[in-house]
Amino acid sequence: MIKFALDQGCDTYITGEASLYTIQYAKFAGLNLLVGSHTFTEIFGVESLVLKIKELNENISLVKLQEEHFELNNKE
């Protein structure tokens, strides 16, 4: 996902989880990385944060990255 963000021209990546690889890759790529706790970045947390930041700078844009999640209890 972080490479996709870079490919979209993003300069900052906000996530609720980060591995050592993610941190190192962001540093190598010169990408700002904001890691919040998983709980506080769920649902609308990241979008709300971007909207607050946008109040300070109208040039900020939100790029929503879609990812597939595997659900262990999926009964389909």
Image: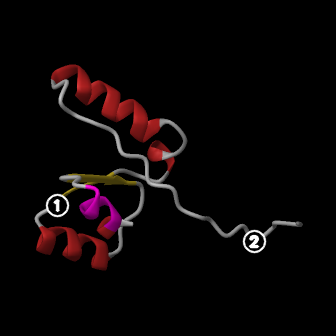
Towards the viewer: 70 or 60 = 60
On the image, numbered disc 1 is attached to which residue?
Answer: 31
Under mark 2, the amino acid is Leu
Under mark 1, the amino acid is Leu
Q: Residue at x 30, y 72 (%)?
A: 22
* SS for dot 1: loop
Residue stretch rendered in magenta on the structure:
4-8
Q: Residue at x 22, y 51 (%)?
A: 12
Image quarter (top left, top right, bottom left or bottom right) of the C terminus:
bottom right
Q: Position of residue 43 (x, y in %)?
A: 55, 41
Looking at the image, tell me whether mark 1 or mark 2 is earlier in sequence order: 1
In the shown orientation, is residue 49 left or right of residue 23?
right
- Identity of the residue furthest to the front in this view: 8
Rendering quarter of residue 8? bottom left
* SS for dot 2: loop
Q: Position of residue 49 (x, y in %)?
A: 34, 33
Image quarter (top left, top right, bottom left or bottom right) of the N terminus:
bottom left
Magenta stretch holds residue 3: no
* In the rendered image, the vertical position of residue 18 relative to residue 54, given as above or below: below
CA–CA distance between discs 1 and 2?
32 Å
- Identity of the residue furthest to the bottom in this view: 21
On the image, numbered disc 2 is attached to which residue?
Answer: 72
